[in-house]
């Protein structure tokens, strides 16, 4: 398999996940798209240069994290998920009572996620993307035990909100 084909396969598998992760860092959708493209361009250049990337998924998230934070630091103001983006991400099935209850639960969950610390949100998102504790620790530059603690606190808070 050529480098181009390998990067293309990784791009297809992880592009949306990386994009949504970068959004959680507070970038606007257009900025998140640019960062996502830059991440995969860097992966291609790295692999074409002969460097071996043992875990491409972890690699792209680490680069996305660093590049996203760098991009955000250049901007004076950041924005959370916009209502327009939330509408795009929603999955409306029908207008039944069940849908109304699910919408309320989702609203409470989104609110609870916004109330988590930035580190807890990042750890939760990266874990949801399938990264292991060690990979998350390397991506964020923190100890593995800290990953576990952030994740534990985040999940406890979300469980509490869902069972209220």
Image (cartoon, rainbow, N blue to C red):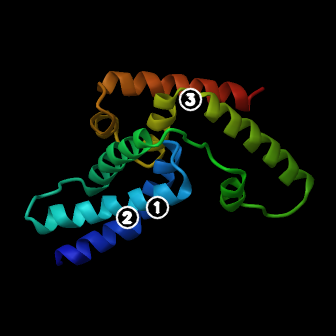
The residue under the point 42% across, 61% down is 34
Q: Earlier in the sequence, mark 3 or mark 1?
A: 1
Is residue 132 shown left or right of residue 55? right
Secondary structure, mark 1, is: helix
- Quarter in which the C terminus is drawn: top right
The residue under the point 31% across, 39% down is 139
Q: Which mark is residue 142?
A: none
Q: Earlier in the sequence, mark 3 or mark 2?
A: 2
Where is mark 3, residue-wise? 155
Q: Nearer the viewer, residue 25 or 132?
A: 25
Comparing labels 3 and 2, the label whose residue is closer to the camera: 2
Cα distance between the residues tagged 2 and 1: 6 Å
The residue under the point 47% across, 56% down is 31
Label 1: few (<14), some (14–19) or many (≥20) C-alpha neighbours in 10 Å: some
Secondary structure, mark 3, is: helix
The image shows residue 32, relative to residue 1, as above or below, that is: above
The image shows residue 62, relative to residue 45, as above or below, that is: above
Secondary structure, mark 2, is: helix
Where is mark 2, residue-wise? 37
Q: Residue 94 occupies which quadrant of the picture? A: bottom right
Cα distance between the residues tagged 3 and 1: 28 Å
Cα distance between the residues tagged 3 and 2: 31 Å
Is residue 21 shown left or right of residue 99? left
- Quarter in which the N terminus is drawn: bottom left
Is residue 100 shown left or right of residue 53? right
Q: Are marks 2 and 1 in contact (CB under 8 Å)?
A: yes
Q: Position of residue 121 (x, y in %)?
A: 51, 35
Label 2: few (<14), some (14–19) or many (≥20) C-alpha neighbours in 10 Å: some
Where is mark 1, residue-wise? 33
């Amino acid at each position: 398999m050529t480098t181009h084909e390998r990067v293309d396969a990784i791009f297809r598998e992880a592009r949306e996940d990386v994009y949504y992760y970068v959004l959680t860092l507070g970038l606007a959708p257009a900025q998140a798209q640019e960062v996502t493209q830059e991440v995969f361009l860097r992966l291609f250049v790295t692999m074409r240069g002969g460097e071996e990337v043992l875990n491409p998924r972890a690699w792209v998230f680490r680069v996305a994290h660093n590049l996203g934070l760098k991009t955000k630091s250049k901007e004076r103001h950041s924005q959370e998920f916009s209502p327009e983006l939330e509408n795009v991400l929603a999955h409306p099935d029908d207008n039944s009572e069940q849908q109304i209850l699910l919408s309320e639960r989702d609203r409470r969950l989104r609110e609870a996620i916004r109330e988590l610390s930035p580190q807890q949100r990042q750890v939760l998102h990266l874990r949801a993307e399938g990264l292991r504790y060690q990979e998350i620790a390397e991506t964020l530059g923190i100890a593995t035990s800290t990953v576990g603690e952030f994740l534990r606190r985040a999940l406890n808070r979300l469980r509490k909100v869902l069972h209220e």
